[in-house]
Image (cartoon, rainbow, N blue to C red):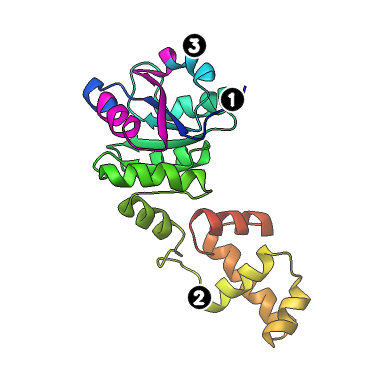
Amino acid sequence: MARDLDIRVAIIEDDETIREGYAYLIGNTEGYKVTGTYPSYEDAARKIAHDDPDVLLLDVELPGISGIDALPKLKKILPEAYILILTVYEQEDLIFRALGSGASGYLTKNTPHEKIIAAIHEVMEGGGPMSAHIARMVISSFKRNEETPLTRRETEILEHISIGKSRKRIAQELFIDLETVKSHIKNIYHKLNVHSKADAIKAARDNKFI
């Protein structure tokens, strides 16, 4: 059966006022259609596949299974749907768990209504909409840790090691002798308290030194 051209949206939100508000907003916007609203993952799990939404608005704080824990389950039920997190929570660990579990965007509940509509459209176009504060948090997480114990040269050498270059090649590319490279690597291992190349790379990446 051919589907209509409206963007189909389902909502999982335990607060009835918020849930109905989103449903009214989206349902009364031309080009959008609400196919189902649910107060919990457990309620949604039984019927949401039939709703066949293009986009799912998902709250984090739900009774029973939380939105974050429900994410991978919902991705299995709705492999083609885009999931937008809508929440009051801005903790970094929740954001990265959500994005790592397949969320396509992360918006806070104080997001203006027109921006929620725009985010639904954006995610359908392949975008990853985020509230400005969330986006700043994500970007800052990729910045290098300024508290690194490594010197600039040690950092440079470890970055070369991390992409598979040999000590000899590093020496050639940085115009330093091989013994100097070995000395820097010895210092890197000592500062990071590791004993192998793999452990040095892991420690540096975990701490955002590279």
| Neighbourhood count class around disc 3 (C-alpha, 10 Å): few under 14, some 14–19, many 20 upward | few
Where does the image place residue 26, in percent across and percent down from the top left? 34, 33
CB atoms of marks 3 and 2 within 8 Å: no
25 in the magenta segment: yes
Image quadrant where one finds the N terminus? top right
85 in the magenta segment: no
For the magenta stretch, what is the residue range? Answer: 20-43
CB atoms of marks 2 and 1 within 8 Å: no
Residue under the image location 50 percent in, 43 percent down: 124
Q: Amino acid at mark 3?
A: Arg
- Between marks 2 and 1, how big is the CA–CA gap? 46 Å
- Check disc 3 and report its element: helix, strand or loop: helix
Q: Amino acid at mark 2?
A: Thr
The residue pinned by badge 2 equals 151
Residue nearer the viewer, 67 or 104:
104
Q: Which mark is residue 76?
A: 1
Residue 196 visible from this viewpoint: no
Residue under the image location 61 percent in, 58 percent down: 201
Where does the image place residue 208, in percent across and percent down from the top left? 49, 59
- Check disc 2 and report its element: helix, strand or loop: loop
| Neighbourhood count class around disc 2 (C-alpha, 10 Å): few under 14, some 14–19, many 20 upward | few
Q: Which mark is residue 1?
A: none
Question: Given this view, does label 1 or label 3 mark the residue nearer the observer?
Answer: 3
Residue under the image location 28 percent in, 28 percent down: 24
The residue pinned by badge 3 equals 46
Earlier residue among tags 3 and 2: 3
- Between marks 3 and 2, how big is the CA–CA gap? 56 Å
- Check disc 1 and report its element: helix, strand or loop: helix
